[in-house]
Image (cartoon, coloured by chain):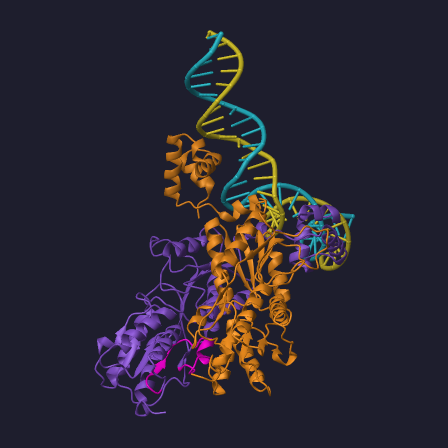
Chain colours: A purple, B orange, C cyan, D yellow
Amino acid sequence: MSNIREVARLAGVSVATVSRTLKSPERVLAPTRERVMAAVEQAGYRPNLMAVQFRSRRTGNLVILVPTIANTFFARVISGAQQAAQAAGYRLLLCDTQGREELERQFAELVYAYQADGVIQLRAYDPFENAPADADVPPIVNACEVLKAGRYPTISLDNVAAAKAMTEHLIGLGHRRIGLIKGSKNSPLTRDRLAGYEAALREAGIALDEALICHGNFSLEAGYAGAQKMLGLAERPSALFCENDEMAIGALKRIRQAGLRVPEDISLVGFDDIPMAAYCDPPLTTISQPAEAFGAKAVEMLIALIEKQPLAEKHVVLPFELTPRSSTARIDNLGKR
Amino acid sequence: MSNIREVARLAGVSVATVSRTLKSPERVLAPTRERVMAAVEQAGYRPNLMAVQFRSRRTGNLVILVPTIANTFFARVISGAQQAAQAAGYRLLLCDTQGREELERQFAELVYAYQADGVIQLRAYDPFENAPADADVPPIVNACEVLKAGRYPTISLDNVAAAKAMTEHLIGLGHRRIGLIKGSKNSPLTRDRLAGYEAALREAGIALDEALICHGNFSLEAGYAGAQKMLGLAERPSALFCENDEMAIGALKRIRQAGLRVPEDISLVGFDDIPMAAYCDPPLTTISQPAEAFGAKAVEMLIALIEKQPLAEKHVVLPFELTPRSSTARIDNLGKR
DNA sequence: ATAAGCGATGTAACCGGTTACATCATGGGC
DNA sequence: GCCCATGATGTAACCGGTTACATCGCTTAT
């Protein structure tokens, strides 16, 4: 592979002139420029970006820590991030962490080794929590699953409001016994959506029934298991709120197996609006999130951080939308067709 | 940030000794080693990997070109690749190409700029097709959607055999009019699965009916549209083979809307065995593919290529499995419950 | 005519590791 | 007591760009 000295030799100029020709052509006389360009062509020269980055201490890489890429919602986030990064001349270093903190830390520390310029964390965990407080933390933004009082900029959804709106939607349809299948134990999403659920019940004057709340982990299997528990209750709920669509689809399967119909016998709602939500039977009432926007906004803010531009706001909240489909019905229609 | 010279100064040794202490400690006397380690600790020293890579001309990055990360199957492939890369000390540079060839080329060329050591291509397109034949192509492997006579190692499934097995399964259940919803136009997957379908019909002595074959593109929407076309036929098929699960789930929705039952009125099968396939209603008969293994094997082969180890085989074929679930039934049960 | 000014180009230091080679000390064999 | 082998450590070149500063030649003002 040829290098800049080779090109300089071919063109009969110095390496500085070659460098200038490529980076700021206006500073080089036209005839010289042409000689250089011809030499570049002849040598098949491509700058060694590693050398450039080494010198400039910039890699153009952004680490993105994803809890699990197999989740459709995160896939959309990544897709949005990738496009934004691409457009800004950055690249994405992907880390499917499977929730393993040592992996998250290991990847996040790539920024210390000058392997990446910043980090996007999609989970509510600070990979640098053990770093001494005085150490200056590298550029990092936290999106989707967000740390409450963290030191990083965040991009999130008002999960409390969204879950409240969804619960109110069910209450508005006459439901009083509303089951909730929660997400992963330590996720703020789980906590916030639970809070929204509770707030809606409280405001409607409905007593909270702990038996109607069960654990989950955002997987199809958890939804299935959760529904099983709910259906086994002496007084089963007339509506079931799953904290994401995957669990709702898992629950749907179990409900069907029990010979019950959605929404005639039980209303069912999810959260996220994954593509499949519109395609299951019945189509799922859910909360639509601008998944790609999460990724794009995260990249945008991270780049601002890296390039030391001022951030318009440190905590961005993206809008949600309640998307009613056919998996919910008025309770007075219960059992009727 | 401290560097190796700073550490050397603190420990009162030369930079070479510091380097040796970290890379081959056995070549340094214990007391010296301890002094160096203490200095490393004190300075909070972390080697600048950029400098290391610059010197060694190795980045440890692998570009992975993904047609679309939003597809559950590819998400699994990436997940497998990521784990294998991680284990081998490599990292994944993700490119969601959305099928745009200029993006694919642009990312693939990162290897020329020493930004990555190799490329994994999951689509049947040679990003270096325009490179002069004499130019030595960088390490690259082609997985999933594979180029027939390409110059690269491949990891693929015998799609012809799998589609043939699936079609034979349907024929074995008594079906004679079997619809096929194809994948994307230029994909070898589409071609191969069509070939398998045709071969099975031919061997069973069933005449090919062009009306039963329609175009698609692996999306939910395409499945829906395809099913609509099939159901509109004067003599509608008794079974429908979709070239992937997403399309099958799309088709399922349309079939339901028409008031028909699966499998009582029409059998339905997919391909890939995405997690959702087991959770739709009815659970989908499909072809299981070892998606994670595609990614892992691709990484393994690519690393062998990069490290100039011999490849055991240039064209790896991974096994498939026909997974019968409840979306298929004998035709003599048609219409019965 | 000369000095100052300016634009084009060249020279070489620099980024932070790695490593070939040089140097130095120690100990063993004769 | 001397020589050499051996092992520990030091010195400095090197990777390939970028860029501060030097240099050179030409124009313009005085």
- In the displayed structure image, the side of residue A295 where residue B313 appears, left or right: right
User: What is the magenta segment's predominant secondary structure?
Assistant: loop
Position of the C terminus of chain B, as image quadrant, is bottom left
Tell me which residue sits at (35%, 74%) in the image: A243
Q: Quadrant of residue D22?
A: top right
Looking at the image, can residue A81 be seen?
no
Q: In which quadrant of the rendered view does residue A25 lie?
A: bottom right
Where is residue D18? Give x, y as percent.
Answer: 60, 52
Viewer-closest of D26 and A329: A329
Left or right: residue A298 versus residue A231 is right
Asked which quadrant contains residue B111, the reply is: bottom right
Q: Is residue B127 visible?
A: yes
- Foreground residue among B133 and A65: B133
Q: Residue B67 location, x and y as percent?
A: 57, 66
| Residue depicted at 59% across the width and 86% down the height | B233
Q: Nearer the viewer, residue B23 or A305?
A: B23
Asked if residue A39 is positioned above or below residue B79 in the image, the reply reads above
Residue A333, percent from left and from top = 33, 92
- When the figure is inspected, residue A54 is found, relative to residue B267, above or below; the finding is above
A270 is within the stretch colored magenta:
yes
Q: Is residue A314 magenta?
A: no
| Horizontal and vertical percent position of residue B214 | 61, 78
Residue range corresponding to the magenta coloring: A264-285
- Residue drawn at point x = 37 percent, y = 35 percent: B34
